[in-house]
Image (cartoon, rainbow, N blue to C red):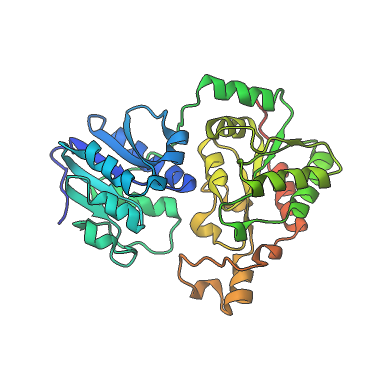
Amino acid sequence: MSPDFSSAPPRRLCILRLSALGDVCHVLPVVRTLQDAWPGTEITWIIGKLEHKLLGHLPGIEFVVFDKKAGRAAYGDLRRRMSGRRYDVLLHMQLALRASLAAALVPADLKVGFDRARARELQWIFTNARVAPREREHVLDSLFGFTEALGLRGRSMRWDIPLPEPALDYARRAIPDARPTLVISPCSSHVLRNWSAEGYAAVADHAAARHGLRVLVCGGRSELEMQYGERIAALMRQPCVNLVGKDTLVEFLATLQRAALLISPDSGPAHMATTVGTPVIGLYAATNPARSGPYRSRPWCVDRYEAAARKFMGKPAAELPWTEKIEQPGVMDLITPGDVIERLDALMAAGAPRTATR
């Protein structure tokens, strides 16, 4: 079934992408492309509870929050929200069975999913149209297959996440002047992607002593993140501000907007920084930065994925499936403080770091 909106755009369109933080950041330029091409189309986005806290202020979008922690009750709530509706198009953009079960509750004439080769977890059963096959692309680029399936060829590469004034006030307190600031967000939700606290402390000391950067350590309220923040601060010789557990998602995003750069593993914060134009030194060994690196900062990433493929998988990365994750104990030890310092010095040499102006 091939959609044809050449004569008239869809009147109502639904997007299904529940999680995670980085992935919904990748979806946002697709949403902006749809809005720019079809300003009269009503857009609904079925989204996760945490992700809604980040994007819920976006204008022109109706959000339907799906709380996966609610279990079966979440599906009952979605069924009630969808009652009496009919969409011209559903873009089913998540490869997870729970998302496909949610897709089954969305009344839509056209349900577009991934091509058969990528449609894991039975996604193809819940769709009646597919995007064209795409190979070895960055995740964000691959998502434009959905707009192309609807006949759109252009791309609106913008994010424009609104930040409420209280969040901006928080960021002004965290970064109160024009001194360039390094933010460290040390933890991924996938613990085997995390680098060592000792490594972060060594790099942060170098950043402060060599480049005069203010250092902020940020993160959520989990026990692991709190321990990381305390450990990094304790190990550093230079001054450090530990803000772990003290901000909300939008406050953290506002802080990133005022920062000069971020250092982070493959995690949601790396992609959040991209949305506000902040350079990211991404730490990649367990995952491939060519596929999931911070979209506009891939040249600044520390990339040890090839070394990880050879050490842990016994073959070059080119012979692995494009989606392969090498989440093995010790994989992040392939990254040394010297590797990160080299990228930091190169980024600083590339131009004056951004200073807070708002």
Q: Quadrant of the C terminus?
A: top right
Residue 127's place in the image compared with 217, above or below, is: below
Residue projecting furthest to the right:
237
Q: Position of residue 66 (x, y in %)?
A: 35, 42
Which image quadrant for residue 70? top left
Q: Position of residue 349 (x, y in %)?
A: 73, 43
Total count of labels? 0
Q: Is residue 133 left or right of residue 297?
A: left
Residue 168's place in the image compared with 53, above or below, is: above
- Foreground residue among 329 and 342: 329
Q: Residue at x 33, y 51 (%)?
A: 93
Say if residue 337 shows up in the picture.
yes
Residue 308's place in the image compared with 355, above or below, is: below
Q: Quadrant of the N terminus?
A: bottom left
Say if residue 358 shows up in the picture.
no
Which image quadrant for residue 191? bottom right
Q: Residue at x 59, y 38 (%)?
A: 278
Q: Residue at x 18, y 35 (%)?
A: 11
Q: Residue at x 71, y 34 (%)?
A: 181
Q: Position of residue 309 (x, y in %)?
A: 58, 72
Residue projecting furthest to the bottom:
314
Q: Position of residue 204 (x, y in %)?
A: 77, 45
Q: Is residue 245 left or right of residue 180?
A: left
